[in-house]
Image (cartoon, helix red, strand yellow):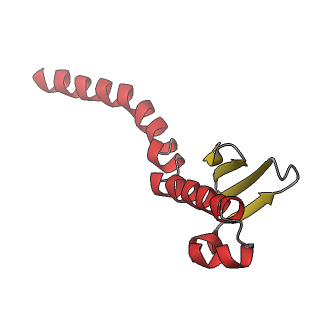
């Protein structure tokens, strides 16, 4: 008689936990969906420093790019000069992570995204 009781309990536990285990296997862990913090920091660093190099120091792109090797080769860099001399923007995309630095005459380059 005792055997049937334990077997029944085990069957009930298995029936209750099986759907949760299947859902957990289908769902990726939270860390896998978020890019690592180092990627966010790297993108922000390149955006801010590249912006400062171009617009605060006034150096040409050919002079600024070598300072950020190899990170800048892995990134998609977009420089928006349409509102110069008052404003400019540098966007850096490292995979899914996008960082943006905005230049203004008053504040220099600051991270805006």
- Image coordinates of residue 18 in percent, x first then y, are 40, 33
Please give left or right for residue 87 compared with residue 3 in the image: right
Say whether residue 83 is left or right of residue 12. Answer: right
Q: Residue furthest right?
A: 82
Q: Is residue 12 visible?
A: yes
- Identity of the residue furthest to the front in this view: 106
Q: How many numbered marks have been drawn onto this rendered protein structure?
A: 0
Residue appearing at x 65%, y 73% in the figure: 64
Q: Which of 45 and 64 lies nearest the eye of the viewer?
A: 64
**Which residue is pictured at 19% across the width and 24% down the height?**
4
Closest to the observer, 42 or 14: 42
Regarding residue 29, the answer to whether it shows in the image is no
Whole-percent x, y for residue 7 in the image = 22, 28
Q: Picture coordinates of residue 8 (x, y %)?
A: 25, 23
Residue at (18, 21) in percent of width and height: 5
Quarter of the picture containing the N terminus is top left
Q: Name the foreground residue: 44 vs 57.
A: 57
Say above or below: 18 vs 89: above
Name the residue at the left extreme. 2
Above/below status of 15 relative to 51: above
The image shows residue 60 at horizontal and vertical percentages of: 74, 73
Image side of residue 44 versus residue 60, left or right: left
Q: Quadrant of residue 12?
A: top left
14 over 62 or under it: above or below: above
Note whether 62 is above or below 99 in the view shown.
below
Q: Residue at x 36, y 30 (%)?
A: 17
Quadrant for the C terminus, please: top right
């Amino acid at each position: 008689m005792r055997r049937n009781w334990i077997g029944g309990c085990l069957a009930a536990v298995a029936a209750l936990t099986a759907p949760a285990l299947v859902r957990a296997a289908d769902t990726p862990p939270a860390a896998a969906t978020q890019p690592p913090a180092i990627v966010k920091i790297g993108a922000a660093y390149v955006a801010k420093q590249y912006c400062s190099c171009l617009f605060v120091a006034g150096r040409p792109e050919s002079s600024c790019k070598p300072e950020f090797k190899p990170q800048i080769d892995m990134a998609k860099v977009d420089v928006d000069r349409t509102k110069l001399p008052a404003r400019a923007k540098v966007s850096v995309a490292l995979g899914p992570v996008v960082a943006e630095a905005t230049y203004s005459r008053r504040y220099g380059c600051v991270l805006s995204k």
